């Protein structure tokens, strides 16, 4: 069981900014930007590489539209923000439950690293 599953199950507290029947969004405990929020699907999906090409389209779309709404709610839509999905070890994924990062509140450098 991942730490994200424990957050979904309310076994570990989180600073939740959004929740519905499909996903949960909360502030990252180790932020790399003034605003750093994670959005996780309640369905357990290991990584973007493990999605079901047909049945996971709806949840993936929901995660991104939720990211847009949260960014607007946080005031990030004015100056811009970054949305990132790290995939597997070489992609920088450290928790193996699909998650979307929303980062903003500062200029995002390129390349990211």
Image (cartoon, rainbow, N blue to C red):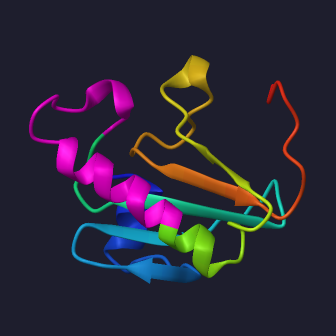
Q: Is residue 32 above or below residue 54?
A: below
Q: Identify the magenta region.
A: 46-68
Q: Is residue 80 left or right of residue 53?
A: right
Specify whether residue 6 is painted magenta. no
Q: Is residue 18 above or below residue 111?
A: below
Judged by its main secondary structure, the magenta piece is helix
Determine the residue located farthest toward the top in the rendered image: 90
Q: Is residue 8 left or right of residue 87?
A: left
- Residue 80: x, y in percent? 74, 56
Q: Is residue 26 left or right of residue 19?
A: right
At horizontal 35% and vertical 61% (from top left) the residue drawn is 5
At horizontal 42% and vertical 65% (from top left) the residue drawn is 66
Specify whether residue 62 is painted magenta. yes
- Residue 103: x, y in percent? 71, 56
Determine the residue located farthest toward the left in the rendered image: 55
- Residue 68: x, y in percent? 51, 63
Which corner quadrant holds the C terminus?
top right
At horizontal 22% and vertical 55% (from top left) the residue drawn is 43
Count of numbered tags:
0
């Amino acid at each position: 069981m991942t730490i994200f599953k424990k957050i979904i199950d309310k076994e570990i507290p989180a600073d939740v900014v959004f929740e519905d029947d499909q996903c949960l969004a909360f502030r990252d405990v180790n932020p790399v930007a003034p605003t750093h929020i994670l959005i996780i699907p309640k369905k357990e999906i290991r990584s973007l590489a493990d999605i079901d090409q047909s049945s996971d389209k709806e949840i993936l779309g929901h995660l991104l539209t939720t990211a847009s709404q949260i960014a607007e709610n946080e005031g990030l839509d004015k100056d811009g923000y970054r949305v990132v999905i790290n995939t597997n070890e070489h992609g920088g994924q450290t928790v193996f439950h699909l998650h979307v990062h929303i980062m903003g509140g500062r200029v995002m450098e390129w390349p990211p690293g």
